[in-house]
Amino acid sequence: MKNLKIMKYACALLAFCASGVLGGCNDEIEDFRKTTGSQASNTVYIDAKDRETSYSLLHSVNEGSTGMNGEVLARFPVHTTLPAASGISVSFKIDNTLIDVYNAKRETAYLPLVSDDVSMNRTTLYIPEGGVVSTDSISVSYSKPFSTLNDLKGYLLPVRIIASTGTDVETNYNERVAYIVIDVAKENGIQFDQTMASFTNIPPIGLFSDLSAIDFSISSITPVENDTKVTLTVNNQLIGAYNQANGTSYQSVPEDIAPIEATIAAGSSKISGVLSYTGDVTALNNMNGYLIPLEIASIEGQYFQPVNEKRVFYVAINNSNRYAALVTSDSGLGSRVNDRSGYNVVKFTNKDGATVSTANGVQPNGMFSGNFFAVQGLSSNWLDISIDLGADTDNITGFFIESAQPSASMSVKALDVYYATADMYSNGKESYLGNLHNSGNTGILPIYVQISEPVKARYIILKKVTPASQFIMWKNFYIYTAN
């Protein structure tokens, strides 16, 4: 008998659900609780245009987050199908329990917005007697910057009517939820890791840089999911803007440079490449110099963009009439500057970049007071030495380095000469004056250096200072200026 009663109640319940009277015996929406009788003649609903508000939020590499503005995500009133018999009160809440249902039905994976960052201006709307629309609107706002919404699954915010209170009124079950949908896309940026390479030619002495293999590297902001081809082209139209911005007069190289294709492998974020200039470098002798702007022209994939600030790799070829040359005495160098109290060696390293210790304990600054320093064990090494003159000095015409021993084996056989003003040095820039060496690859003794045109400098920079054997012993350094 008990079983018969259970079957009777089950059948009644099935019939009740099939009739659709409750409207809640399906899997579309969870936790819906009716607040009025099922036979009300008037219904409260959210208008069709307000039941889903969609945004496409794009996190752009160069433009920031686009597709959403302001704080308000949605604003809408409520309606009734018939004029209200009396005042109607409609209450709302944010109901994240509906997100799973929505995702299951639409085969999406939207995430909820953090509740502390979401607010409604009110939770109750009122429809006056005789009215068919509320006097106010629900306004839903998001307080954080939209750049914080960066999960590619996207976000969903359901706002639901939870009760409609009034005479002869009920809530329309199928039209009681407003969904705010935020789809998220992110661009991946592609960029050059270094945006400048600089070379110096000195045509008067036939010194031209090797441009056959100019290294560069490009990277993506985040690792790429698939093999991504990046096409690079030389865009000479950028030269005019570069010259205007930097006060230069660079020319374009006369030969065309073929496009370069580089592929960033799936799972990686970096690749190296080589720009090769196959033209006659000795023909690049215009004293205005040359500029090769290698630009990221295209990237495979919808959501890849070049990073504007690092879109171009500039190769600058600077031509100069200034050069350093070995002479046999100081007779033509000008006036020797004897006050060396402000001089200081600011770099004293080997080819590996490690600071070098002197053999006799006397520091390199000793050569500004006639006290020699010595470095040994340099048979397969060299020194990089940067000398700070203490202040920018005008009209430098040359310099002299005196060896501590009158023996070529205690001197150097080659060195590269650079100079820099205070501003140049602080910005990591320097000007090349050439390589000095004896034709017989023997020690230079003494080292008198003449600069073809006077220069202004604070730093005299000597690189790849290579010993004739394995010792370097210097005891004096002087500069000369124009009379």
Image (cartoon, rainbow, N blue to C red):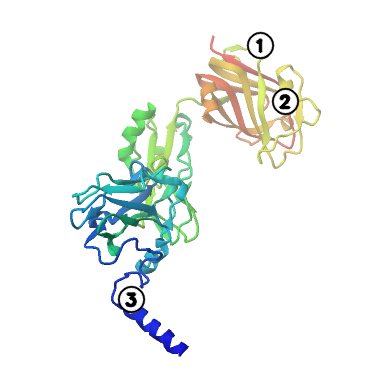
The earlier-in-sequence mark between 3 and 1 is 3
Left or right of 178? Residue 278 is: right
Residue found farthest to the right: 360
**Does 123 sit above or below residue 29?**
above
| Three-letter code, disc 2 | Pro
The Cα–Cα distance between marks 3 and 2, rounded to whole angstroms, is 96 Å
Q: Position of residue 29 (x, y in %)?
A: 37, 66
**Does 190 sit above or below residue 326?**
below
- Front of the two marks 3 and 2: 3
Residue in the foreground of this view, choosing between 101 and 21 = 21
Left or right of 80? Residue 35 is: right
| Three-letter code, disc 3 | Cys
Q: Position of residue 131 (x, y in %)?
A: 19, 49
Q: Are marks 1 and 2 in contact (CB under 8 Å)?
A: no
Q: Position of residue 188 (x, y in %)?
A: 42, 51
- Quick one: SS at disc 2? helix
User: In the figure, residue 393 lies in which quadrant?
Assistant: top right
Q: Are marks 3 and 2 in contact (CB under 8 Å)?
A: no
State the residue at coordinates (21%, 49%).
129
The numbered dot on residue 17 is 3
| Three-letter code, disc 1 | Asp
- Label 1: which residue? 339
- Label 2: which residue? 364
The earlier-in-sequence mark between 1 and 2 is 1
Residue in the foreground of this view, choosing between 85 and 395 = 85
The Cα–Cα distance between marks 1 and 2, rounded to whole angstroms, is 17 Å
The Cα–Cα distance between marks 3 and 1, rounded to whole angstroms, is 104 Å
Residue in the foreground of this view, choosing between 309 and 14 = 14
How crowded pointer 3 is (Cα within 10 Å; few <14, some 14-19, many 20+) is rated as some
